[in-house]
Amino acid sequence: METDPQSPPDLALRPLAGARAWIITAGMAGMDVQVRGVAEALGLDYEMKHVSPKGIWKLAAPWGPVAPRERFGQPGSLFAPPWPEVAISLGRRSVPYMRALRRRAGSQTFTVVMLDPKTGSGIADVIWVPEHDRLRGANVITTLTAPHSFTAKRLAELRQNLPSEIAALPHPRVAVVLGGKNGIYNFNEDDDARLQSALQSAGKLGASFLVTPSRRTHAELFNAADAATRDWPRIIWKGKGANPYADFLAHADLLVVTADSVNMTGEACATGRPVLVFTPSGGSAKFDRFHAALQARGATRPLPDRLDAIPDWSYEPVHSAHELAAQIEQRWRQRSSA
C-alpha cells in the first residue's frame, strides 16, 4: 500500500504501528525531537535509550566499539534482550551501539540510522540524511527538511487553543525565531543591525511580535530583536518559565527565522505560513542548498532589509516526519518480502 506523505494514514494502517522499538541518541534535545517525530509517525511503541560514552570510547565513536563496562546485551544492562523489532539512532555517539545491536540481533531488528554515520552504508538497513547532504546510496533515503514533532494534527490542536496573551496581540502576528552563532554563520554587528532594521519596518506596518531565542542565541542578537520590537505589541520570551515556542509557531501569521538552524526553519515550514529567512554573514554550500530548496518549494523567501508590506503567500506545509516514515515502511516491506 502506497502512502501519501503529506496526508498520513491513520496509525492503525501503519504496518509498523505498535512495533517494539529502541530509540538511541546521546540525549540532546534537538536529536530527540527528530527521532521522536519519526517514531510517532510510524506509530512505534518506543523506548528512549540515551547513551553517554566516556573517555576513549567517546573519542572513538562512531568507528570504535561499545565500552566493555557497558555490558551490551547482558541482563540488567541498558541494552539487554529481548531485542526490539525496530531501532532508530541519531548521532555519531550512537553508532557503536547500533553496530553492536545488529551484530547481536541480526535480522530480528530493522535498523534506521539518521544522519551520515561516517562509517559506510552497512551500518543499518536504512540511512536517512536531509536532501542538502551529499550522502547517497542504495539504502539512503532523503527528505527536504529534518523530521520533527510539529505534525499537522499537533498544529491543528494548538490552533484550537489560543492563549489569551497571544489573542490580545493584533494581526499580523510575526514570530521571530532566533538561532545564533555556529561554525557556519558569524552574526557580526552589521548583521544584528540589519535584523533590527527589518523587524522595525514590520512594526511600522502594524505587526505585533512573538519573539523567542534558542540556547545558541547570543546577547547582541537578542538585544537587537528586543530593541526592534519593544515599541509594538509583543510577547518576548527571555528564557524563564515555559517556552511558548510551540504556540508561537501555531498562531503566527508570518515567521522570521535565522538561517543558521535547519531544524527551526523546517519546523516553521510545517505551518504553511510565510517564512522569511534572515541570513547573517558566513554560510556554506550545504546550507545554501537547503535554503534554495525551501525557496524553490515556495515555503520561504529571504528577509529583506526593509519590509514595504507584510508578505502573505501560501504553500503545502512540509511534514518530513511522515514522508520519512512512508519511505521507511516501504524499505521494511521490501526486506520482509525478500
Image: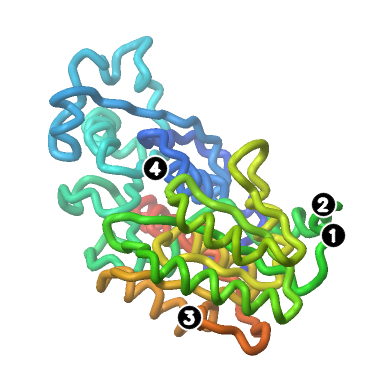
Q: Is residue 69 left or right of residue 288?
A: left
Q: Circle 1 is placed at which residue position?
A: 167
Q: Secondary structure at mark 2?
A: loop
Which of the marked residues, 1 or 4, is nearer the chain's N terminus?
4
- Classify residue 260 by image quadrant: bottom left
Which of the marked residues, 2 or 4, is nearer the chain's N terminus?
4
Q: Which mark is residue 157?
A: none
- Classify residue 75 by image quadrant: top left
Q: Is residue 154 left or right of residue 25?
A: right
Q: Are marks 1 and 3 in contact (CB under 8 Å)?
A: no
* Nearer to us: label 1 or label 4: 1
Q: Circle 4 is placed at which residue position?
A: 88
Query: Whole-Å distance between the Cαs marked 1 and 2?
Result: 6 Å
Which of the marked residues, 4 or 3, is nearer the chain's N terminus?
4
Q: Are marks 2 and 3 in contact (CB under 8 Å)?
A: no
Q: Circle 2 is placed at which residue position?
A: 163
Which of the marked residues, 2 or 3, is nearer the chain's N terminus?
2
